[in-house]
Image (cartoon, rainbow, N blue to C red):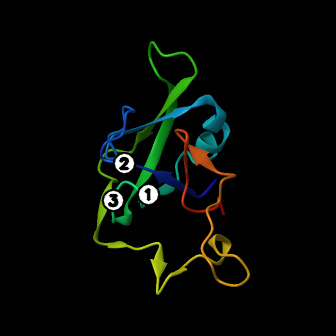
Amino acid sequence: MAKLVLLHRTDSIYDDEPDRVYDFPRSYLSAMQEGRGDWVVYYEPVKAGTRGYFAAAKIRDVVAKPGVEGRFLARIEPGSYIEFDKPVERLRDGRPFETALAHPDGRPKIRWGATVGGAPIAGPRV
């Protein structure tokens, strides 16, 4: 199973409903299939808001998006979506919590190698 961080914006142009379904392109199908049956964490990017990591849910299954070639839906296990009481910021005192998101000198960096829906995922697959 893969550990995934899913980028979500409240103004998303995709058919995302964090408590029900996550819309993504074919290029991330393999990673999302690896995440079936496991928990994911939702992250709101800095440009979209201030929530940081704000919820978790379990991926029930992954299916082709009806009527849209090359897009897929990760369906969320009913009742598994949990919003955090308090969002977890990506940075504290200007430094990332995750060492994989920092340069050796501690400056933050974005992990561009992992993306979903055309936008960067905040953290590495672990």
Which label sits on residue 70? none
The answer to whether the residues at label 3 and label 1 have Cβ atoms under 8 Å apart is yes
Decide which of 111, 25 is in the foreground and name it.
111
Mark 1: amino acid = Pro
The answer to whether the residues at label 3 and label 2 have Cβ atoms under 8 Å apart is yes
Q: Position of residue 22 (x, y in %)?
A: 43, 39
At horizontal 38% and vertical 45% (from top left) the residue drawn is 77
**Hey, which quadrant is residue 31 in on the image?**
top right
Which residue extends farthest top? Answer: 67
Q: Position of residue 119 (x, y in %)?
A: 53, 46
Image position of 115 with respect to 86: above or below: above
At horizontal 54% and vertical 60% (from top left) the residue drawn is 122
Which label sits on residue 9? 2
Which residue extends farthest left? Answer: 85
At horizontal 37% and vertical 33% (from top left) the residue drawn is 13
The quarter of the image holding the C terminus is bottom right
Q: Position of residue 38 (x, y in %)?
A: 52, 54
Mark 2: amino acid = Arg
- What secondary structure is marked by label 2? loop
Residue for badge 1: 45
Distance from the alpha carbon under mark 3 to that under mark 2? 8 Å
Distance from the alpha carbon under mark 1 to that under mark 2? 7 Å
Point out the frontmost of discs 3 and 2. Answer: 3
Which label sits on residue 49? 3
Mark 3: amino acid = Gly
Distance from the alpha carbon under mark 3 to that under mark 1? 6 Å
- What secondary structure is marked by label 1? loop
- What secondary structure is marked by label 3? loop
The answer to whether the residues at label 1 and label 2 have Cβ atoms under 8 Å apart is yes
Decide which of 90, 75 is in the foreground and name it.
90
* N-terminal label among 1 and 2: 2
Within 10 Å of the Cα at label 2, are there few (<14), some (14-19), or many (20+) other Cα atoms?
A: some
